[in-house]
Every structure is written in C-alpha cells, then in structure tokens.
Amino acid sequence: MSATNYNPYENAQAQFDKVAAMLGLDEGTCQLLRQPQQEVHFTIPVKMDDGTTKIFKAFRFQHSTARGPAKGGIRFHPHETADTVRALSMWMTWKCAVVDIPLGGGKGGVICDPRTMSQGEQERLCRGYIRHLWKELGNTVDVPAPDVMTNGQHMMWFMDEYETITGQHVPGMITGKPVGLGGSLGRTEATGFGVITCLNEALKKMELPIEKTTASIQGFGNVAEYAARKYTALGGKLIAVSCWNATDKVAYTFRKLTGCNAEELASIKDSFGSIDKEKAIALGYEVLPGDAWLSQDVDIIIPAALENQITPAVFGNISKTVKVICEAANGPTTPDCDPLIQERGLMLVPDFLCNAGGVTCSYFEQVQCNMNYFWTKEEVLEKLDSAMTKAFLDVYELAQEKKLYMRDAAYTIAINRVANAAKVRGWV
Ligand code: GLU
C-alpha cells in the first residue's frame, strides 16, 4: 500500500481499538471514544483578488470534551479530508490526556493551498471560517491553534473576527498568537523543544548520550526546525533534513555528513518550511531525493512532516543503525509498522506524546491570557520541560512495568484518563 492509500481515521481507530480491547473497555465507552462527539462541515465563500468568488470546504470536529474544552489546531492543506481531521481530533484528545492538561480534543481544517493565496485572500478565508463557526468556539468551549500551514497571523485574524462578532476581548479563545498580542513566550519553540525533551529522556534510558548520536529529520516546518535547533544545541549531529521544495514541487533531502546547521537552514527556508535548493548547495549541502532521509545511517529518525510517511513498503529502507523513532508529526507511522518496530526492538516515542509540547504550551498561553499576566520565557520553557519529562517517564515506566509497546503504554494512560472522565460525568 502506498502512503496515500492509508486512511488516518482508520489508523487512529485501529490504534484505539487495540488498546481498548486490551483494557477491556465497555462497548458504550468504545463507541463514544472511537469517533468525534461533534462534526461541523461547512463552506466558506471567499472573494479572490481577481474578482471571482471561490468556495472552500472547511471542517471543525470536536472529538472529546470529557476532560475540558476541545483543543487543537486548524490546518490549511490542499489534500485535507474529513477523515484526516477526524483522526487528528482523536489524537488531540489523547495528546492532552497523556500530558494531563484539562482539555479535550478537536481539530479543524480547510481544503486550500495558502502557498498560492495572497495575504488578503487568506485573511478573508480566516474571517469567513469564524463567521460560520463562532458559536461553536470559545475559551471554555473549543480553542483552536496553529497547525500545518497556519501561523500566528492566521490566529490573529481568527481572534479579531471572533472578538468583533462577540464584542468582547477573549484572547483565550485561540492559542499560538504572536507574543505581545496574547501569545506566550516559548510557544513557537514548544513543540520542537518538547520532541527533544522526550528524545533526550529516551536516550538517557538507553544510556546513549545525546552528544554521541546522529539524526535525520523529515520536514522543516515549525516543529522540525525547533527540534533541529534543540537537538543540535544539545550536541546531537543532524545529518539530513528532508522537505518539500516550493520551486520544483518535489521533496529533497539536504545532507551534510559533518552536521547540518539548523540556524543556517532556517535562514534559507520560506515560511512554509521549504529550503532554497541553490542556497543550500552554496552552503555545502548535498541534495538527495526526498525519501533519502529515511535511509541515512543515523541513530535517530524524526518524522516531523505529515501522516503516513513510514509504511511497511518503506520500512525496510530504515538503516540498521537506527535505534529510535521519534514521531514529531501526527500519525507519521502506519499501524501495520508497529509489529515491525517491535520486532526490530526500536525505541519509539509515539506521536501524541512526542509532540504534546505544542498543546501544553497552548494551555499555558490560555492560562496566561485568562489571568492577563504573562510569564517569562524561562518560566514557560521550564514548566514545559517538566510537563514533557513527566509525561515521557509515566509512559516509559508503564511500558517497562507491564512490558508494553511504547505506543500502547501511551494509549493506555490517555484512554484510561478520558474514559474515567466520561464515566465520572455519567456519560457512560
Ligand atoms: N496543532 C498542534 C498539535 O497538533 C497544537 C495544537 C494546540 O496547540 O492546540 O498538537
């Protein structure tokens, strides 16, 4: 099966069903948690710069509010589907639960390509999204955030439209806002830094000093960039970075065997994570095919782009030197790879644990907005580091104690917390 034949929602349900069966969850709870609680599908008419009107398909799904307001990003992607949003909303529930923050799970998406839209068109799209959806959102209801191809500017348009309609200041209705405008210091770095906190804890357990390791990353968007910065700052050697090239419309792997410089690569990328090929060559990078990131002789692979990137069809390409898969993206590995990962005895840092730093910092941002008092960057990053370390150790220790696969251990903790909230509320 090629990556495009995998349905992320079926993957998310298969992962859930496996652990729900292990836990002996009752049928009612299973039915409640294996699908979103609420789905809103709608269209947004946008006046384009050329005078035509384009209709965009949009979604916002709330998977679970058992533990608190729904929480999760809004993605802009030409290949967005309802099933991708369903899966991502489910993963948000487990993500918030595994780090034990009092939030549920949700996700939104718009089928569009912001890379081909002007700023004005994107602003009108964002405002249209809120005009349709504002009644379903709010500080105590459902709180969006950035995701694939959305950023702080989009969050400000969403927030401004919401505040204009409701006639109040509610910066806590959305997170990932720019610093000084209700955003939290550290939010930009949070997901990538959290990935490396988990990785570092995993390496300590494996008695592998991070400064003696090598890694290869797929993606160079926000998550990958800050993971790369943190990993190299801690002394790790980054061998390769693969990303989509906006000019040639293909992916390339940029490799430097003496070690990639994350700051340098960040300085030659566009806001969507596309690294400039010519500038990279001038800086001494080799340009290899897009999938070469997976077959590098490194200790750690970090898929930090989109879902369904590691399938059984490419699993054999992973170098025998690899010891750790650190899933920075949401759903990068298909469930049929899980037995292969276990057979090879690889350490897995599963996605909704690995990348929970973003939503954890979003939670801190919401707390600060609601207090109208903002912490220093050091305070935020310290709180983030301890939350991520604790979440990793909880999962790792359960995996050791019950001899569980790391993904199943993370699911066990998350599902138990959500199922318990639903039970105590009297829903099931
Ligand atoms: N989009 C990010 C994620 O998938 C962050 C979500 C949030 O901060 O609410 O975790």
Image (cartoon, rainbow, N blue to C red):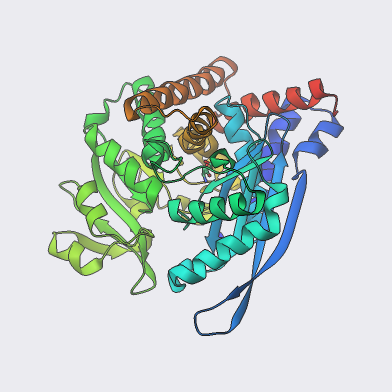
**Image position, residue 217 (x, y; %):** 35, 48
240 with respect to 72 (left or right): left
Instruction: Between residue 395 and residue 214, name the one nearer to us.
Output: 395
- In the image, residue 256 above or below residue 358: below
Residue at 29 percent across and 37 percent down: it is: 230
Residue at 28% from the left image edge and 63% from the top image edge: 288
Q: Residue 423: which quarter of the image?
A: top right
Q: Position of residue 215 (x, y in %)?
A: 30, 42
Q: Quadrant of the C terminus?
A: top right
Frontmost residue, 80 versus 397: 80
The location of residue 47, given as percent across then percent down, is 58, 77
- How many numbered discs, if any? 0
Q: Position of residue 182 (x, y in %)?
A: 46, 40
- In this rendering, is residue 362 above or below 149? above
Left or right: where does residue 85 sit relative to residue 323? right
In the rendered image, the quadrant that contains the N terminus is bottom right
Identify the residue at horizontal 64%, vertical 26% (top origin).
Answer: 412
Residue occupying image coordinates x 42% and y 27%? 384
**Residue that extends furthest to the top in the rendered view of this protein:** 401
Q: Is residue 250 above or below residue 242?
A: below
In this orientation, which residue lies closer to the viewer: 90 or 11?
90
Can the viewer see residue 369 in this picture?
Answer: yes
Instruction: Look at the image and tell me whether residue 309 can be seen.
Output: no
